[in-house]
Image (cartoon, rainbow, N blue to C red):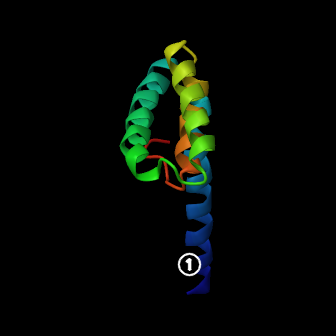
Amino acid sequence: MSRIFIGLAAALAMASTTAYAATSSISAGDAAEVCTKLNAQFTYLEPFKEGLPYWTKAAQAHKSGVQDCKAGNATEGAQLLQTAISDLYVKPDVL
């Protein structure tokens, strides 16, 4: 029983690590789509999170991420948008 639990825990740990690192290895087109989805998620969260102690840091990361996405630097922009959403203590929808 404990072997199964250990194996399951190890598999889940590896899967979560792989998912978070995914934006560094996606194509520019896919990164642009991720930018759009993450921006929409941040925009949705904005009215609920604005003004909280961690808001300023998250808003700055969001602004930089959107600028990178619009400038054709979608991979870096998507990573910044992930950071912005994580700074709001929310798990990003698209990783």
Residue 57 point in image, percent of width and height: 63, 42
33 above or below 20?
Answer: above
- Element class at badge 1: helix
The quarter of the picture where residue 40 lies is top left
Q: Which residue is mark 1?
A: 4
Q: Amino acid at mark 1?
A: Ile
**Where's residue 89, x and y in %?**
54, 56
Looking at this view, is 83 or 63 the one in front? 63
From what the image shows, is residue 89 above or below residue 39?
Answer: below
Q: How many marks?
A: 1
* 82 vs 67, nearest the viewer: 67
Question: Which residue sits at x=45%, y=25%?
Answer: 30
Residue drawn where x is 58% and y is 17% of the image:
73
Residue 38 against residue 90 in the figure, above or below: above
Q: Residue furthest front?
A: 51
Q: Residue at x 45, y 22 (%)?
A: 32
Nearest the viewer among 65 and 31 is 65
| Residue 22 place in picture, x, y as percent | 56, 38
Q: Assign the N terminus to one quadrant of the image.
A: bottom right
Task: Classify residue 46 by image quadrant.
Answer: top left
